[in-house]
Image (spheres, rainbow, N blue to C red):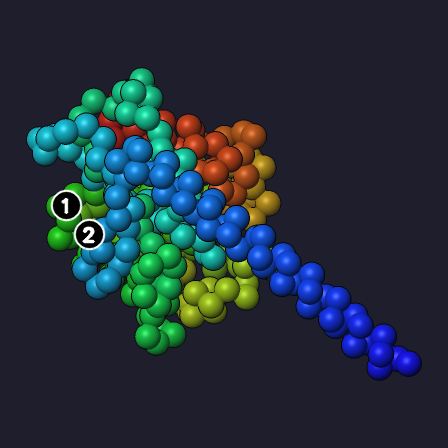
Amino acid sequence: MRKIKRLTLLVFFGVVGLGLGFWVLPLLGQLETVHRLKLDLEGVYEKTLEGGLHAWVRDIGLGQEGRSCLALIHGLDQNAMTWEKILLIPEKKWKEMGLVDPLKIFALNLPGSGKSPPAKEKKEDQVRRQAQKLKEALALECPSWLVVGNSYGGWVAAWLAFLWPKGIHRLLLVDSLGLKEMRPPILSWSIPLQAQVDEDALNLVLPKLEVPTLFLWGKEDTVTPLTQGYQMRALLRSAIWREASPCGHWLQLDCPSVVAQSIVDMIHYGSI
């Protein structure tokens, strides 16, 4: 009798699963199509960079003279589409925030995210190696960059600025990871975090950075709380500090206008 009940339950849940798959999968496909349509309408396009790295690219304004190049680096278990709200900001809005010259935006997919191929070896997931890979790709696109990194992406961005001081002229770290003390329990199982060693931490890197830097932190961040942000800022006292509310760990999702305004301000660094 028990076997019959178990079999009945298996059949029932199997039918329910098939039904959900029949309805949910097409719906997910439609949502992706909607996202792509939105990007297309704003002129966002895909590009494969050196090393196979994938990026979503958008040009704000026309012309090469005076153009700023912006690289957006996502966090753990995310991809370049976490920057969708930034990519979709209308050109008129950028101008209202103070953007004058043309801007070329690259929302990058780190190795193993989006359409970027995964690392072949575990050691390639180290932030230093990922930063080097980004350097090789970005150097072929633009000689000088403003780099924005959120969470783990901030860790990579800081290393990129350290390894390539001539190529990174501005740095914006948004609720960044990177200190030895920063091992958020909810992210500790992530493969890239497991690949890091003590030498990858930013404790000795941040004090050596000379690039103008802005720390932007969400007051409601529960992954890397404000206290951890203060620890980072203490290692780079020349940096600008901003807090945003009501915003959590992923400001590009919670408060995209704050992130965008900070980008514009860093482009015009020296006037803030």
Of 208 and 11, the residue lying toward us: 11
- Evaluate whether residue 232 shows in this view: no
- Evaluate whether residue 44 shows in this view: yes
Of 83 and 211, the residue lying toward us: 83
Q: Quadrant of the N terminus?
A: bottom right
In-image side of 205 versus 176 (left or right): left
**How many residues crowd around disc 1 within 10 Å: few (fewer than 14), some, or many (20 or more)?**
some
Instruction: Point out which mark residue 138 bears.
Output: 2
Instruction: Point out which mark residue 142 bears.
Output: 1
Which residue sits at x=49%, y=42%? 250
Taking the view exactly as shown, the residue that stands out farthest to the left is 65
Kind of residue indicated by mark 1:
Cys
Question: Vertically, is 93 above or below 143?
Answer: above
Instruction: Residue 227 in the image: state x and y as whole percent.
Output: 55, 43
Taking the view exactly as shown, the residue that stands out farthest to the top is 96
Kind of residue indicated by mark 2:
Leu
Instruction: Residue 26 in the image: state x and y as whole percent.
Output: 51, 52
Which residue sits at x=80%, y=72%? 8
Instruction: Residue 110 in the image: state x and y as whole percent.
Output: 34, 58
Secondary structure of residue under mark 1: loop
Question: Vertically, is 82 above or below 49?
Answer: above
Secondary structure of residue under mark 2: helix
